[in-house]
Amino acid sequence: MSEEKNYDLVIIGGGPAGYTGATRAAQLGLKVAIVEKNKTLGGTCLNVGCIPSKALLDSSEHFHMAQHEFDQHGVDVSGVKLNLKKMMERKDKVVSDLTGGVSYIMKKNKVDHYVGLGKLVDENTVEVKTDKGSETLKTKNIMLSTGSVPNELPFLKFDEKIVVSSTGALSLEKVPKKLLVIGAGVIGLELGSVWNRLGSEVTVLEFSKKICGPMDAKSTKKLQQVLTKQGLNFIFEAKASSADVKKDGVSVTYEDMKNKEEKTIEADVVLVATGRKAFSEGLGLEELGIEKDQRGMVKIDEHFRTKHKNIYAVGDLVRGPMLAHKAEEEGVAVAEIIATGRGHVNYETVPGVVYTWPELASVGATEEELKERGVKYKAGQFPFTANGRAKAMNSTDGFVKVLADSTTDRVLGVHILGPRASDIISEAVVCMEFGGSSEDLARSFHAHPTLPEAIREAALDVDKRARQF
Ligand code: NAI
């Protein structure tokens, strides 16, 4: 029988937006419940996204280095062998440690965790369908954070063995001889890199003319060159259009848009990485008249409210980049809006990272965007070949680019292609959050020798006074 419970906030979806929002709301004194259909919290990010992919990227990078780079450091190793099962077990352990950590945080903050499918019944009621039956939760506020799922191509239905989404590509039982990746976006490049390093022959089909969609053109061009050197084969202006899936492989036909002809490519496994779509099935949106936009995302106002003022939506379910850190900040903002009346996300400073090697990290506007908007800017650039730490690491591919307003010198965008770009971009984010200038970056101490010195040098180069050449 259904039992009724009362809350200030019920969150449907336990990913980064959900568990971070729940924690903040609990800290602010609200009585909170989190409803998650999977057994573990953490959503796509922790279970089948950011975290397991980074675990495999790190492991495969070690394997690659042992095979191809150790000897340059004077480390002779022979008989380097891949133990894929062990690599996968380590990845699974990283995931279970972290999802366990999230459960602990919920308990510590006295957030009630329901395992089951949450559905809106009315503005103040959520029903949770569990293994054992159903529970009814009464609540003053609801936050929807049900995330997103991979796009499927109509002619390539996921079986997660031969036709895989990012989820299946994180758990292949053996290294495919030939891996075809459809889509040269973030997922295609990260998981393509993993399997390339582990020994697959990887071909990437991309609809447009470049990798990584709208990211900085010069950085993405250089990244493509480096990845090509690492063994990835790119076919641009190629639209996957049909496929024949067999028991032990797949042949995919694509439209070669340059030459206006159809071509076919064979592979053992195909990874479809053509984007993700908001997941709101079975949530009861239609019954409550909650609208979606053309892309199927839940429509919200500037305070994350749906047409019902006490029902909020955040994360991959709503407009903006599908990124865990964006979702987290939105979850926190909603908790703060409910508890204090104020909450805000600065979308101008959301960093984006591609965890290839070198990594590509970016915040703010690209040169292409600034030109299109008619903004006058100055650009400074500095290569990692001239950075002492990168040289010591033997990882000098890439550069930093700092873009600053011509008149005010305010930093408008920073783009980094290089070692650990994901870690060092944070300095630029903080600078932009404070409305800082390239002069601020240039005059701040940077320990020597470190990778972030390349950011300082690029900032100095905005006024053509870089020092470390
Ligand atoms: P994406 O939107 O980044 O890239 C998809 C690519 O597929 C595009 O370049 C598109 O032109 C191409 N494409 C689409 N249909 C095609 C077709 N029929 N034939 C050939 N090419 C085709 O999407 P992706 O890589 O699947 O990632 C999904 C989301 O997950 C993104 O929003 C991304 O931000 C997020 N994500 C972020 C990560 C990170 O922050 N490091 C890691 C993984 C995912």
Image (spheres, rainbow, N blue to C red):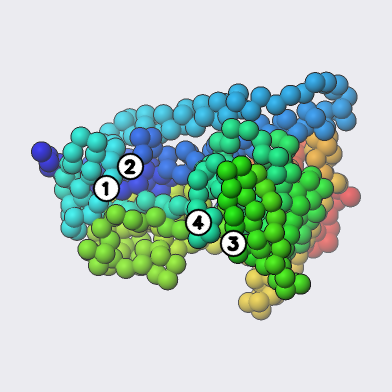
Identity, as a three-letter code, of the amino acid under mark 1: Gly
Which residue was labeled with disc 1? 118
Residue located 36% across and 63% down the image: 298
Q: Earlier in the sequence, mark 1 or mark 3?
A: 1
Q: Position of residue 156 (x, y in %)?
A: 54, 55
Q: Position of residue 14 (x, y in %)?
A: 37, 43
Q: Position of residue 369 (x, y in %)?
A: 65, 71
> For the residue carrying disc 1, how many other residues have a C-alpha within 10 Å: few (<14), some (14-19), or many (20+)?
many
In the picture provided, is 33 more to the left or to the right than 230? left
Alpha carbon distance from label 1 to label 2: 7 Å
* Residue 24 in sight: no
Residue located 69% across and 59% down the image: 264
Q: Are marks 1 and 2 in contact (CB under 8 Å)?
A: yes
In the picture provided, is 301 more to the left or to the right than 164? left
Alpha carbon distance from label 1 to label 3: 36 Å
Q: Quadrant location of residue 393?
A: top right
**Residue 56 - label:** none
